Image (cartoon, helix red, strand yellow):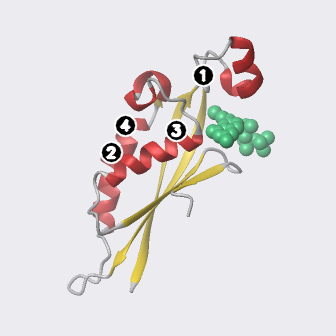
Amino acid sequence: MKVTVSRTAHFNAAHRLHNPNLSDELNKKIFGKCNNPYYHGHNYNLTVKVTGEIDEVTGYVIDMKILRDIIQKHVLDKFDHKNLNEEVEEFSSLNPTAENICVVIWQLLRNQLEEKFDLKVILYETERNFVEYPSI
Ligand SMILES: Nc1nc2c(c(=O)[nH]1)N=C([C@H](O)[C@H](O)COP(=O)(O)OP(=O)(O)OP(=O)(O)O)CN2
Ligand SMILES: [Zn+2]
């Protein structure tokens, strides 16, 4: 019997959506205000869902405190109050769209969790815009 344990987290960060292979004009056309060369910020809300079997001894799928500490160390310490384009190496040549940020967070967390767990990450960039990975 598999159960999903979820933990929410929050960070704020600055970014600029920009593709250096495109002209400034085309970047502005595609990304609009998000292409502002002086950057802009979002208050990101994150939900991390870990699915697995309930351990017979502890009654846990995963200790929430352990999950909290993994998110803190591997996501929040890296992203919170940062300029994603300039300060987070994963985005040095990757456009920090909500989709790409979500996949990067998934990869960072996947590396920290035992293989027996399934992992899903949901990232809200604004109250109305959110993405999830994997998609099913
Ligand atoms: N597929 C994507 N589309 C867009 C992304 C993205 O990351 N992936 N990002 C943006 C902007 O960065 C931002 O998320 C949109 O901000 P905004 O237009 O202010 O969105 P709001 O929900 O706050 O406002 P609405 O006016 O209700 O849309 C754009 N697209
Ligand atoms: Zn933005």
Q: First in sequence, mark 4 or 3: give its number.
A: 3
Q: First in sequence, mark 2 or 1: give its number.
A: 1
Whether the residues at callouts 4 and 1 have beta carbons within 8 Å, the answer is no
Q: Is mark 1 within 8 Å of ligand 1?
A: no
Q: How crowded is mark 2: few (under 14 residues within 10 Å), some or many (20 or more)?
A: some
Whether the residues at callouts 3 and 2 have beta carbons within 8 Å, the answer is no
Amino acid at dot 3: Asn
Whether the residues at callouts 4 and 3 have beta carbons within 8 Å, the answer is no
Residue 122, given in percent of the width and then of the height, sits at 54, 56
Query: Which residue was labeled with disc 1?
Result: 19
Q: To which quarter of the image does residue 28 belong? A: top right
Mark 4, secondary structure of its residue: helix
> Does residue 71 appear in this view?
no
Residue at position x 35%, y 52% from top? 109
Mark 2, secondary structure of its residue: helix
Most extreme residue toward the right is: 29
Q: To which quarter of the image does residue 41 belong? A: top right
Query: Which residue was labeled with disc 2?
Result: 74
Q: In which quarter of the image is the N terminus?
A: bottom left
Q: Is mark 2 within 8 Å of ligand 1?
A: no
Quick check: 108 left or right of 8? left
Mark 2, mark 1: which one is toward the viewer? 1
Most extreme residue toward the front is: 21
Whether the residues at callouts 4 and 2 have beta carbons within 8 Å, the answer is yes
Amino acid at dot 4: Lys
Mark 3, mark 1: which one is toward the viewer? 1
Instruction: Give the alpha-carbon distance from disc 3 to disc 1, as whole Å.
Output: 22 Å
Mark 1, secondary structure of its residue: loop
Q: First in sequence, mark 3 or 2: give its number.
A: 3
